[in-house]
Image (spheres, rainbow, N blue to C red):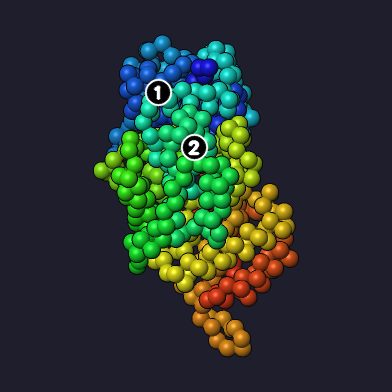
Amino acid sequence: MKQDMIVILDLGGRNNTVIARTIRKLGVYSEIHPHDISLAKLSQLPNIKGIIINGGGNNLVDGVKIDVDHRIYTAGYPIMVVNHEPAEAKNKLPNWPESEEAIKEILHAFIFNVCQAEPNWNMKNFIENQVDLLKKQIGHKKVLLALSGGVDSSVVAALLIRAIGKQLVCVHVNHGLMRKGESEAILEIFKNQMQANLIYVDASKRFLSKLEKVSDPEQKRKIIGTEFIRVFEEEARKLEGIEFLAQGTIYPDIVESGTKTAGVVKSHHNVGGLPADLQFTLVEPLRHLFKDEVRLCGIELGLPASMVYRQPFPGPGLGVRCLGAITRERLEAVRESDAILQEEFEKAGLDKKVWQYFTVVPDFKSVGVKNHTRSFEYPVIIRAVNTIDSMTATIEPIDWPILLKITDRILKEVPHVNRVCYDLSPKPCATIEWE
C-alpha cells in the first residue's frame, strides 16, 4: 500500500526530528531532506501530499543565506514555511511553539485539512513497501550483511530475509571489541536456532593491530569502519554474485554524522567511515527510521522481544568505551566491568527500565589503596541513560544499594581497577557514548 508523505526540507531548523516524529505519530509518513534538493529529485519521491520548509538560525552556509529551489514554491504542493520569508510562500508560520502538543495541533491542521493526507503510516505498510523496494533494487543478486546481533542489524536481516530469502549472506565479524560472551551468543541464536546463512570471522588480532596506539576517537571509528568493509570484501571474493552491502543505518546516525546545515557531532562507522572505493551498492532499508520505530519494525517482522529490546551497542563496540589508545589490559577491564553491570541490572529489574547502560575505562590512572598498599590503576565509569530516539537522553537515578553492590563487585573482580564513578551527564550536552 502506498503511504502518503509529508516532506520536511531542512533550511536550518533545529527541530526537524521533532516535527518528523510528530507527523508519524499522527499516522502520516514523513522524511527530512536537504534544502538544496532539486525539484526533479523531489518529484521522484512517492505520494508527496505536502512540504514543510523548516528555517532557523542555521540558514547560512559559508556565510551565504540559503533557500530551497524556488520552483518548489510553485510546483503545486501545499507548503508550510517556518521562520523564513520567501515572497512565494503562502502558509507562513513565524516560529514553532515550544510545546509538542501545540506543534501537534499545527501539524494536524496542515496535514489533514490543507494537504488532505491519509493516516496510513504504520509498520505493516512500511514493511510491505520496503519489501517491494528491496526486491526491485536487488533482483536476483546476493546481499552481504554485517550481522552484529544488535537491534539494527537483526531487523535488517529479518527484513531482507522476508524480501529475498537465501540471497542474503550474513557475516559476523568478531573484531575483538565485543561484549563478554556476545559472539558465542550470536552464533547460537542466528546459526543454530534461526538457521541463518551465517559466516563467522575471527578478526580480533587484525583489528587490535590496526588500532594500536590510535587515540583519536574519530580515527578509531574510521579505522574500524574501513576494516569492516575490507573484511567483507575478502569474504565477498569467496562468494559469487555479491553486489550489495546491507547496513543497519538509522536516521540518528545520519543526523549526528553531519548535514548541510549542521556540523558533525561524531561520525558513525556506517556513515563517515566508509572507504571511497567501496565495491558494493549500499542497501539501507532503515535509514529513515528512528530507534523506537526500528524496534516496532522488528516486532512486526516476528523477531523475539528479547532480541528487539536488547542493549544497544555501537558499531565500533568496546573500542569507543576503552577511551583513548586501546590496550588489552583496559579492554578486558571494560569487558569484565560491563558484564558485572549487565548482570546486576538484570537482577534488579533495571534491564527492563533503562534503555542503555554500560561501562567505560579512560586512559588515565588514579592513586588508590588495595591490599593495604598503594595502587595506581584505572577508574571504571558507569553510564545509564533513557531515550526514545537517541537524539536526547536523560540519566537514570539508580538506588544507592545497587550502585554500591556493583562498585564492590567491580573493585573486587576486575583487575587493574581501583575506582568506580557514575556519569550524571544528560544528552545534550554530553553524547550517549563517551567517544
**Residue of label 2:** 156
Residue 68 appears anywhere in the view = yes
Q: Position of residue 162 (x, y in %)?
A: 51, 30
* Quadrant showing the C terminus: bottom left
Please name whichever residue, 54 or 34, is drawn nearer the observer in this view of the structure: 34
The vertical placement of 58 against 42, above or below, is below
Please name whichever residue, 327 or 62, is drawn nearer the observer in this view of the structure: 327
Along the horizontal axis of the image, is 145 left or right of 117? left
* Residue at point 59%, 83% (across, down): 369
Please name whichever residue, 146 or 11, is drawn nearer the observer in this view of the structure: 146
Instruction: Name the residue type under label 1.
Output: Lys
Along the horizontal axis of the image, is 348 left or right of 338? right
* Residue at point 38%, 27% (across, down): 140
The vertical placement of 114 against 334, above or below, is above
Instruction: Name the residue type under label 2.
Output: Val
Going by the picture, which residue comes out furthest to the bottom? 372
**If you read the primary sequence from the N terminus, does the residue marked by circle 2 or circle 1 appear first?**
1
Q: Position of residue 417 (x, y in %)?
A: 55, 74
Along the horizontal axis of the image, is 309 left or right of 367? right
Q: Position of residue 158 (x, y in %)?
A: 52, 36
The vertical placement of 286 against 180, above or below, is above
**Residue of label 1:** 136
Q: Disc 2 on helix, strand or loop? A: helix
| Disc 2: CA contacts within 10 A as few (<14), some (14-19) or many (>=20) | many
